[in-house]
Image: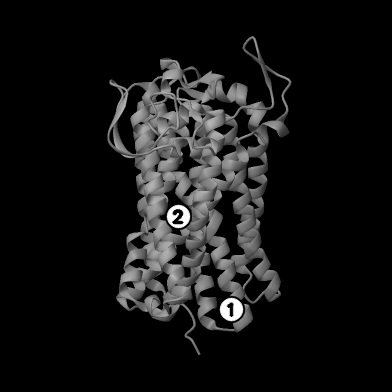
Amino acid sequence: MDDFIAARSQMALSLGFHIIFSCIGMVMPFFMAVAHYYWLRTDNIVYKNVTKAWSKGVAIFFATGAVSGTVLSFELGLLWPEFMKHAGPIFGMPFSLEGTAFFIEAIALGFFLYGWDRFNKWFHWFTGVIVGVSGLASGILVVAANAWMNSPAGFDYVNGQYINIDPIEAMFNDAWFSQALHMTIAAFVATGFAVAGVHAFMILKGENVLFHTKSFKIAAIFGCVAAILQPLSGDISAKDVAIRQPAKLAAMEAHFHTEKSAPLIVGGIPDEENKKVDYAIKLPGFLSFLAHGDFESEVTGLDKIPEENQPPVAITHYAFQIMVGMGMAMMLVAVLYFIALWKKKNWLASPWLLKLFVAATPLGFIAVEAGWTVTEVGRQPWIIHNVMRTADAVTPMPGIAYSFYLFSAVYVSLALVVIFMLYRQIKMVGTLYDKPR
C-alpha cells in the first residue's frame, strides 16, 4: 500500500468510525430528554427507567466519540499538512466553535448524569436538553467545515497565495446549509431506526416488554418523521450540487453525456471505458428535474469535465444508489408505521411490523456511510474543490501504511469494547431500575 492510498484509507476509516458515534451523540440526548419529560409529566416510573438507561448509552457514545474525534483532529495535521497549512486559518472558526460546543456538552452531561435527586427536577431535565442542543451544534459546525471543502469561500486565491481571509464567510459558505440540513436529518433517521430496531428485537423476545415498548415508540417516531423529511433535504442538496459541483452529480448518476431531458438512472453498472451504464432503469427527464427543477433542462455530463478532474464514477455511483435505496426502504417502513398509528392500531403489536424495524436497524448508518462516501469521493481529485488537489496535500512522511494498520487495530478494538458495553447495558435493563408501580 503506497503512502497516498494509506493516508486516504486511514482518514476514511477514522471518519467512517467517528461519524456513527457523532450521529448518535447528536440525537440520543433528544430521545433521552423526551423520555425524561414524559416521566416528569406522568410520574410513570417506566419513563424514568428509559431515561436512565438511555443516559448511560449517551455517556458511552460521548466518550467514544470524544476519543475518535480527537484522533481525527491529530490526523488532519499528520496526514494532510499542506492542506492544514493553508486551510487552517480559513476554516478554523467552526472547529474552534465546535470545541466550545463540545465543552458545554461535557459539562451538561456531567450535570445530568450526577444530578438525579440533587437538582430541581426541571433544571435537571434542561441539562439533558443542553446535551442534545450542544451535540447538534457540534455536528453542524463540523459539517460546515466539510462544506467549505466542497464550496470554498472566504478568501482570494491569487498566485498560489490565500489572501483576504474572512472566516465568517468561509463558515457560512454556499454549501453549509444544504449539507448541515441533510446530515442532521440523516442522523435522526439512522439513530432513530437503530434504537427502535434494538427495542423491537427485545419486544419480540418478550423481555421487559413495557420498558421496550415505551422506548421503541419514542425512537420510532423520531426516526420515521426524519425518514419522511429526508427526501426533501436530499432534493435541496441535489440542486445545490448540480450548480456547484456538476462533476460530482455526473458521477453520482453515472451521467457520461451532457444532454437535455436527462434521465434519472436507478441501479445499473457503469462502464467507464465505453461511457455508458448497463442494466439501469432510466426515468426520462427526472435527472433534469432533480438538478434544476425542470424536465427539459440540460444536465452537464462527464464529457464536459476534463478527464483529470473527473471523480471515480463507479464508487460514487454505487454509494449514491445505496444511500438512496436505504433511504427509500426506511421511508416505506415509516409510512407503514404512521398508517399503524393513525388507522391500523392492531398493526402496532404485530410481529411483522416489529420485524421490519429489526431488519431496518442498520440501514440508516449504511446510508450515512454511503452518503459520506459520495461527498468525499465525489469531490476527488480535489481536497479543496477546484483549488487544491488531494495528492498535493498529503504528508511526505514515509511509513504511513504502518500507521493505517495500527489505527485499524485500535478502531476494531474500540468497536468491540463499545458493542460489549452496550450489550451488557441492554441485558441489565429490568434488573437495575425501579419496577413499575
Q: Name above or below for residue 98 compared with residue 31.
A: above
Crowding around mark 2 (Cα neighbors within 10 Å: few <14, some 14 to 19, many 20+) is many
Badge 2 marks a residue whose secondary structure is helix
Horizontal arrangement in the rendering, residue 152 relative to residue 202 (left or right): right
Front residue of 278 and 326: 278
Residue at 35% from the left image edge and 27% from the top image edge:
401
- Amino acid under disc 1: Trp
| Residue 134 percent coordinates (x, y) | 64, 53
**What residue sits right under mark 2 in the picture?**
190
**What residue sits right under mark 1 in the picture?**
39
Q: Of the numbered discs in the image, which one, if any, rests on residue 372?
A: none
Q: Name above or below for residue 356 compared with residue 385.
A: below
Residue projecting furthest to the left: 279
Front residue of 350 and 268: 268
Q: How many marks?
A: 2
Q: Name the front one of labels 1 and 2.
A: 2
- Amino acid under disc 2: Ala
